[in-house]
Amino acid sequence: MVARGLLDAGAKVVISSRKPDGCAAAVRELADVGDVHAIPADLSSEAECVRLADEVARQSGGTHILVNNAGANWAAPLAEFPAAAWDKVLDLNLKSPFFLTRAFLPALEETATGDDPARVINVGSIDGLHVPHMSTYAYSSSKAALHHLTRVLAAELGPRGITVNAVAPGPFASEMMAATLDTDGDRIAAMSPLGRIGRPDDMAGVVTYLASRAGAYVTGAVIPVDGGISTTL
């Protein structure tokens, strides 16, 4: 959704995922929209975050927009919630955005100007804004922490010509939510005052706004994109 929106806006996009087949499929799907490439990387590892930044610099030159979107979830009852869940979810949802941002800093600073700052956009969740209905202790905690990391980095990187914002999606037809929406989609849609789940253009629009001239004076913000669920329930 994000990649398509940025391609529609004229950006050159590099996609990364730990699955090479997924990368290739995304490039095939989006090739008719714009200039898109993929570099597989397992972003749960700091070394892979650094390698990705080096590969993007080698293949594409400068980087003006970094979207931190990789994520994992884990649901289990309180009495059974394992240590491995905390490690997996926090490594990917919280530590990786930090390590990726740090790895891309030289490239971001190189493209930043006073009128057109470089952008870091973190993908959080409304589960980091309110208490979720499912037993996803590590996920909701990681997203709340990512929202605050967004503010901390905004304060530090603003003087270096980089804005840092987060979007907090509600229910969208993503791979992570597909099974839940199949079994409970009508009830979830009814939670929103707008009576529906998110559409691809809803996510593409908010990220494109933050990456565009219209969002150049916005930093440290966490924007819910959830049809009002987190603010009206």
Image (cartoon, helix red, strand yellow):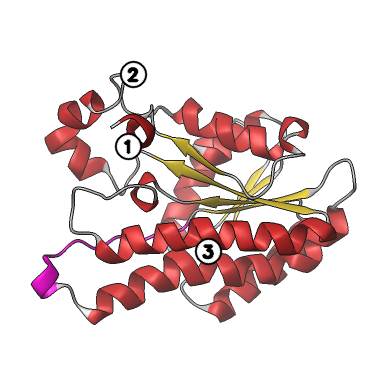
Q: Is residue 106 left or right of residue 207?
A: right
Q: Amino acid at mark 1?
A: Pro
Look at label 3 and name its amino acid.
Pro
Nearest-to-viewer mark from 1 and 2: 2
Quarter of the image with the C terminus is top left
Mark 1 and mark 2 lie on one chain; the one further toward the N terminus is 1
Label disc, if present, on residue 40 of the rendered structure:
3
| Residue 139 picture quarter | bottom left
Q: Residue at x 41, y 57 (%)?
A: 143
- Classify 187 as above or below 57: above
Inspect this view and state whether residue 92 appears: yes
Q: Are marks 1 and 2 in contact (CB under 8 Å)?
A: no
In the picture of the structure, the residue carrying the numbered disc 1 is 171
Residues at marks 3 and 2, CA–CA distance in whole angstroms:
37 Å
- The numbered disc on residue 194 is 2
Taking 91 as reference, is 63 above or below it?
Answer: above
What residue is at 68 percent from the left and 71 percent from the top?
103
* Image location (x, y in percent) of residue 229: 33, 32
Start and end of the magenta stretch? 70-80
Mark whose residue sits in front, 3 or 1 = 1
Q: Is residue 62 visible?
A: no
Local crowd size for mark 1, using a 10 Å CA cut-off: few (<14), some (14–19), many (≥20): many
Give the residue type at disc 2.
Leu
Res 144 → quadrant: bottom left
**Mark 3 or 2 closer to N-term?**
3
The location of residue 8, given as percent across then percent down, is 64, 29
Dividing the picture into quarters, in which one does residue 154 lie?
Answer: bottom right
For image coordinates 83% across by 54% down, the residue present is 161
